[in-house]
Structures are given as structure tokens and as C-alpha cells.
Image (tube, coloured by chain):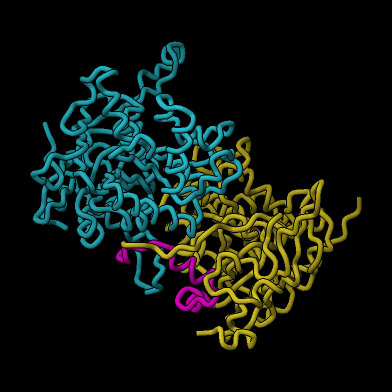
Amino acid sequence: MRAPDANPVPAQPLVQVENLRRFFDVSGGWLRRTVYRTGHVLVRAVNDVSFAIQPGETFSLVGESGSGKSTVGRLIVGLDRPTDGRVLFEGQRMDTLGRAEALPLRRRMQMIFQDPYASLNPRWRVNRLVSEPVGHRMGREERFALAGQLLEQVGLSRSDLDKFPHEFSGGQRQRICIARALASNPEFLVCDEPTSALDVSVQAQILNLMLELQRELGLTYLFISHNLAVVYHVSTRVGVLYLGALCEVGMREQVFGRPRHPYTRMLLDSVPDLELSGKPRTPVAGEVPSPINPPPGCTFHPRCPFANERCKRELPQLHPYGDGTLVACHAVEEGRL
Amino acid sequence: MTVTPTPNTHTAPDDSRTPLLSVRGLEVQFPTRRRTLTAIQDVNFDVMPGEILGVVGESGAGKSMTGNAIIGLLEPPGRIARGEVRFLGQDLTQLDQAGLRKIRGRDIGAIFQDPLTSLNPLYRIGDMLVETLLTHLDISRGEAERRAIGILTEVGIPAAHERFRHYPHQFSGGMRQRVVIALALCTEPRLVLADEPTTALDVSVQAQIINLLKRLCRERGTAVILVTHDMGVIAETADRVAVMYAGRIVEIGPVREVVKNPRHPYTVGLMAAIPHIGGTTTQLAQIEGSMPRLDAIPSGCAFNPRCQRRFARCTEAVPALLSVAPGHETACYLYSDEAEGVRP
């Protein structure tokens, strides 16, 4: 069974994800399973996720903790292997390629991580950090020249080349991470919560830099975040994840302007209102259930005010609506909402 | 050891115009081997009974430290070097630890960022509540248990009777923060210090916790000092807000005024840097540079190296808070007489 493509566009998507699944086995050891009769316990971190990313766009995955958004990012760049499903880069299946064949493709995708304090080796100087992805094929001079150029591209200076990460602030470190990600001249960047660890004023600097680089270098982004305002700011299209599955995918204007899925609606309702309009808000009731034992049927039904018997039994599939938005909700499908 | 009974603060005059808490000239220092660093300087503000005062700033602004200094929880070697913290007529900076402990938990409650670290994992949550109640109030054990279950129900914990006997790890993040709120409010304090109470929580739970805290404090007339980096949370919750930068308050005023009509260039930049849904998506306004480190605070106005509208005076002396509108003050020379010819 294949979910329909989100907003089908004739062009060849740069990245495609088909029926991606990643289950983690969190059962105890053999002894524990035998003594306590617990059996095997699986966390369904990603459960049947499909989407396509067009060249030059920013596709965002938004969701709360445990929604599987980071796992999807890691699966795409190959930091983890899917339990089931495929990742395609320019139509090529990544899982059928050997290591040597995959390498040139892998070089065209890079990742930026959340915590710029943890993702840089504290014992390496900036020039080594930045040039590492490609530096092994270069001489010293060439490497310095490349690293210097990359640093300038992200708004740092050549004089920073000999410094260590601790000499930089959080925002500057994230710039180093971006420079490093750009070293292999990639087309596709997975940005996993790149500004969550940063202050607002620094977040603005980094977001501006990312948008600028996208325009200059024609980059394609997969942007992963829990911050809806940031997602709105950077995205072309948005996918809303809940407990490892997509519940709504569409153009940014549609998802934010006319949210259809009850979860998307309530998520948007829980964003603090800086306009002080005093509009009443109905934040989502309850909390995200454990992905070890997700509710049957639609996983959102225990928190959904529109849930009925069908929602408790049957898992909704993504259905396309007029403007190309895909929504997985029985209530929307039946027109109850 | 004889313990002198603390004055029954609840009989203090409840004139709503006398501040509940009044901080004057607060200065916090950290002596290090090389030199003494001043983390907070010349902080002044009042909190009225029942008022929610937001304290907002980026990391390193000194917002959490201000809160900790008020309730006497500064990590050594940090110390209050100057100033007074007057709470219900008593100067808290003059009290010893025993005196402070009587006030903390009784008249001042505290809620911290991470609910898992602020609850003792080895105690059942019911026992923590009962212990707090018995320590501070003169009631029987049965009465304490009854009140504990009552407050757990009030903070929205389902089946409070059963949950009473559970350990913190048996609760989800949002539920744990509800327990922390119950602990802070169970003795009906006059003031609650909430330091980033929603930062560790998911977006959807964040709104629930903010609503809960706001409702409970409004009902009881409890004043709140809400320390956070999130302007959205402040806008939703606080009556007044103090914006901190490099250890000083740079702007203070009613929330609506500060959010809608910020005066200090730092606040203006901060507000413009926040992306919002439906807003412009081309480029965010950005403040160049970052917050100075404690050992390298620029002379004059600490914000001057990052300020677009700096003029000669800004590098010479620290600006004092000036009134720009009723109840709205900002520490910026642009609003003083010295800005003649500089002001647009």
C-alpha cells in the first residue's frame, strides 16, 4: 500500500521517502524477558512515513517530542537504517547501493545538529573541523583556503581558523557547524532543530544566514523543529508528525492558514500570542502517549474532541484535498469537521 | 537550638498599593581567583500583591540569578554584595539560612525549569506534599493529606487519591510540572518564583501549564515572578515585564506597552527578531553580535557595541531608568535630554 505523494509536482524530487518505518527494540535482555514475561517491546518511532522534497524547497517536519521527526532526518542522511521502506535520492534507492556507490550521493547531503556545543570536537581547531568532510584529499594550503572561504560565507572571519570551539558563542558555533556542512558542496541539508539551543536574537541571525545560503547556493532543506513560528518562517511545505506518522502535509500557507487536522489546529492554538489580541485559545488536552504502546486506530483519538467509534478502530490514511493538502483524519474525510 | 517564631506575615497590611516585594539596588558578585565579577547590578523593581511580573532576557542576562538572589538560593561563591530585598517588611538579605528556609516554601514558593530534578526521586509525591505542609503549617497529618490530595486535584492530576502514592518517575513531564506547581502552591504562599517553568515541556503542554499557573495564582491572589526567555509566554501571562541585559534591567513596564511599543533598542531588536506565524518571511531583523561575557561588559551602556543608534554619550556612563510613559521606564540615553539632535 502506498500513500499518495504530497502535492505531486511533475519534476523529479530531490529526496523521496516511501513508507519509511523505524522500530527500536527496547525489550530487556533474555533473562528479564523470561523472568518477568515481558516479551518483545518495540518503539514505533517512525511508522509508515512518505513524502517527497523538491529541489530548492524547504520541507519542514514539525512535531512534539517522540513524534519521530529527528529519526526521519537521521534515516535520510544514512545515520540509521530503516526497519522498512525506502529513501530515494534523485530517484536512486539508497539501500540498494553499496558503500562505494553511495558515497558520492552521501556527500551531496549533510546534516546540522541541534546542539552546537556537542557537535564540535573541542580538541580540534576550526580549520580542521570545517575542512574535515573533504580535507583528506587536500594539501594544507588548500585546506586552509577552503576553510577560510567557508567561514567567510557563514559570517565568521579567516582569523578564526586557529581557534578552538570553546572560544565561540553558541551562535558562532552553529555557524561553524553550517560551514562544516557546506564543505562538501552539498545540495541537500537536514537541519535538526538548528536554532533550538540558541537565544532569539541569535536564532534570527542563524535563520537569516540559512535563508541567504539557500538563495545563493540553491540548497534544499529538510527542516526539523518543534517551533511552529520558526517553521512558518523558513518553510515552503510543512509536514506535521504525530507519534511517528504524518497527520497533515501541505503548502505552508495552507497548513498554517487553513489547518485541517484537529492536531494541527490545536498545535497552532497553543502557540503563545504575541499580538495580544486576546483571542481565546484551546490548547491540546493531554500529552503525547508513549510510542511503545500507541492507542489503537487514529493515534490522536484520546486527545481529539472529534473522535468517534471509527477513529478508535481504524487508522486513517493520508487523503488529498483540493489545494493539494494531505490529511489523515476520519472526521475531515467524512466532512464532520 | 531555640527558634524564634517568624512574624505571622499573613497579618501584614494588605494594602494593594504597598508592594509585596521590593528590590532595591541589588548587586550580585562572583569572586573568582583573578577578579570579582559583577553578575547583576543596580536592579530595582517592585512586585504588587497578586501581580505577575515577567523577567525576560537571553542567556547570561542575569534573569535567573536575580530570582535566585531574591529567595537566597545563590550558588556560592555568588553573593549579594549590595542592595535589599524587602518582602512583607522584612529584608531577606539580612536573614540567615534558617530564617530564609522558613519563608521559602511558606510565603515564597518556587518552580524550576526541570520538573524531574526538582522532585526527589526517592519520595512519593504525596509524602513530599505532606512534609512541606507539616513543616510550614500547624496542622495535623490527616489534614495535611487531605489538603495535599485537594491541591493535586486542583492542578489537574486525575485520580489524585491513587497518584498520591506514586513516585515522580511514574509521571509524564507535564504531570510532573503540575506536581511541582502543587508543591509550590500548597502552603498558599504570597509570592511564587517561576523560573522557566515551561521550557522543558512540549509546545502543547506548555500552554496547559501556563494557563494552570495563571488561573491558580489569580484565584489565590498569589504574586508571581515569571522568569523566562520566551516573550510569547510573557505576553500571555504577565501584567508587567522587566527586560534584562547584561545584569541590568534595561526596560520595565506594562506588558502591552513593552510588547507593542518597546523603547529600548535592545527590546525593539528582540521583538523584531521573533519569527511569527503569518509574519514576514523574507528576513528577520537581527541584532549583530551577542550578549557580552561577565568579564567583558562594555563601559557605558552595556548594549552600545550592538546598538544601531549609539552616540557618544552611550560609551561614557551607564544610563539610568527614565520614565517614557506611565509606569514604563527604559534605560537609554535616546530618551534623555542628552539625545538632543540625535533623536529622530
Kindly indicate the quadrant of the structure image that contains residue A253. bottom left
Instruction: Say which residue appears at 20% left-offset and 38% top-offset.
Output: A14
Name, please, the residue furthest toward the front: A141
Q: Is residue A164 magenta?
A: no
Q: Is residue B275 magenta?
A: yes
> In the rendered structure, which segment of residues is drawn in magenta?
B254-281
Q: Nearer the viewer, residue A224 or A213?
A: A213
Would residue A297 appear left or right of A202 to someone viewing this image? left
Would residue A301 appear left or right of B110 to someone viewing this image? left
> Residue B153, image x and y in percent?
49, 54
Asked if one can make out residue B185 in the rendered structure from this viewpoint, the answer is: no
Kindly indicate the quadrant of the structure image that contains residue B211. bottom left
> Residue A224, image x and y in percent?
34, 44
Q: Nearer the viewer, residue A266 or B43?
A: B43
Tell me how many marks there are: 0
Kindly indicate the quadrant of the structure image that contains residue B164. top right
Would residue A160 appear left or right of A243 to someone viewing this image? right
Instruction: Say which residue appears at 28% left-offset and 39% top-offset.
Output: A187
Asked if one can make out residue A19 in the rendered structure from this viewpoint, the answer is: yes
Name, please, the residue furthest toward the right: B1
Q: Nearer the viewer, residue A45 or B244?
A: B244
Above/below status of B269 relative to B336: above
> Residue B199, image x and y in percent?
50, 52
Above/below status of A255 relative to B240: above
Instruction: Say which residue appears at 22% left-offset and 58% top-offset.
Output: A259
Would residue B118 appear left or right of A268 to someone viewing this image? right
Chain B as rendered: colour = yellow
> Residue A148, image x and y in percent?
47, 42
Above/below status of B2 relative to B166: below
In the picture, one chain is cyan; tell me its letter: A
